[in-house]
């Protein structure tokens, strides 16, 4: 069991002092100790706040740029834990210049560091619009999109959360900027994966994009719906009508009915609008002989462990 935090608090000044050590092993162990302290499950994020109050954040941000992965890794873990706290606690990390360092870490040769960096950014983009704006200002999104397109699956997963959170909480102008970094195609490609939860996150992100296109259309055309279709995304969405996960099935039904059915009617493409029984979900779908899905409130944000 974890020791009582009242006892741990007494050693924080010592840990803060050890953060200035020139010894690699001491720094590594100190950063790991702080990562355990900041892994905070208290209601008021008391442990995170204690690490902040001790003045550890500037040094931890500095160590994100260490040439030693053995130091970078626990420093990054601690920073990642801090930004799971309140918006005010996350802002301390941002204000100490963490975002340029995090952007650099997205290109780190070590996969676990890239993965943890994406997780850290996903917690920052789950913050307020000002914090999403800070991420955009540092031009982090293109690197996240690159990972979505070319990264390893477990790194892609964290990058998907980071982009989805930004889309969920962003303003109209912020959504325009994010979508402008060509996120639609890579998000659609996530739909062919095997992990149901990640497919749901990608679908929710696409719904935000399609909603944005519908609300800001100057005529009856949703340019983002057109882009989803042109990159093969609609085919992938329709195929998900066959998915045995009920949430996915309901989401894609809703997406097709809301954003694509009217277009199919206009073009008279022969779409079958009679219900089609999804044998896996025991529900009726509308559309082609492929598949469908529905709508759910976005529930972005998650944890990460090595």
Image: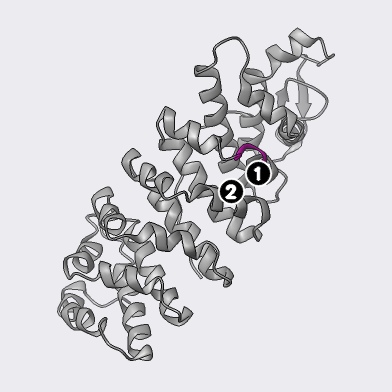
Residue 277 percent location from the top left of the image: 77, 25
Bounds of the magenta segment: 182-186
Residue at 66% over, 30% down: 252
160 relative to 290 in the view: left or right: left
Q: Quadrant location of residue 214?
A: top right
Q: Are marks 2 and 1 in contact (CB under 8 Å)?
A: yes
Question: Mark 1 sits on what residue?
Answer: 186
Q: Which residue does the image show at 27% across and 52% down from the upper left?
A: 91
Vertical placement of 136 versus 113: above or below?
Answer: above
Residues under labels 2 and 1: Cα distance? 7 Å
Rendering quarter of residue 281? top right
Q: Is residue 105 magenta?
A: no
| Res 50 → quadrant | bottom left
Secondary element type, mark 1: helix
User: Which residue is more in the foreground, 5 or 229?
Assistant: 229
**Looking at the image, residue 241 lies above or below residue 156:** above
| Residue 82 in view in this figure | yes
Instruction: Name the foreground residue: 117 vs 295.
Output: 117
Q: Residue 280: give x, y in percent of width and height.
A: 74, 37
Query: For residue 145, which numbered disc appears in the image?
Result: 2
Query: Who comes first in sequence, dot 2 or dot 1?
Result: 2
Classed neighbour count for the residue bearing mark 1: other residues with Cα under 10 Å, few (<14), some (14–19), many (≥20): many
């Amino acid at each position: 069991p974890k020791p009582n935090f009242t006892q741990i608090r007494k050693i924080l000044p010592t840990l803060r002092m050890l953060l200035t050590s020139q010894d690699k092993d001491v720094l590594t162990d100190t950063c790991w100790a702080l990562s355990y302290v900041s892994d905070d499950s208290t209601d008021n994020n008391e442990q995170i706040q204690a690490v902040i109050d001790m003045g550890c954040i500037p040094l931890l941000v500095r160590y994100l740029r260490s040439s030693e992965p053995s130091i970078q890794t626990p420093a990054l873990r601690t920073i990642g834990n801090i930004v799971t706290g309140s918006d005010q606690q996350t802002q301390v990390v941002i204000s100490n210049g963490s975002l340029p360092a995090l952007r650099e870490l997205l290109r780190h040769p070590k996969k676990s560091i890239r993965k943890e960096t994406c997780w850290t950014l996903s917690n920052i983009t789950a913050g307020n619009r000002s914090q999403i704006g800070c991420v955009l200002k540092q031009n982090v999104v293109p690197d996240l999109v690159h990972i979505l397109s070319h990264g390893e699956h477990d790194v892609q997963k964290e990058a998907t959360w980071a982009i989805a959170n930004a889309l969920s909480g962003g303003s109209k102008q912020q959504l325009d900027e994010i979508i402008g970094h060509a996120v639609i195609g890579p998000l659609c490609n996530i739909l062919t994966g095997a992990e149901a939860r990640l497919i749901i996150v990608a679908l929710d992100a696409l719904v935000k994009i399609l909603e944005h296109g519908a609300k800001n259309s100057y005529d009856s055309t949703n340019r983002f719906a057109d882009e989803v279709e042109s990159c093969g995304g609609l085919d992938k969405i329709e195929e998900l009508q066959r998915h045995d996960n009920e949430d996915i099935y309901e989401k894609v039904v809703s997406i097709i009915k809301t954003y694509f059915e009217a277009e199919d009617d206009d073009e008279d493409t022969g779409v079958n609008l009679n219900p089609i029984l999804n044998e896996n979900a025991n529900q009726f779908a509308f559309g082609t002989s492929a598949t469908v899905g529905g709508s759910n409130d976005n529930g972005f944000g998650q944890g990460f462990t090595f």
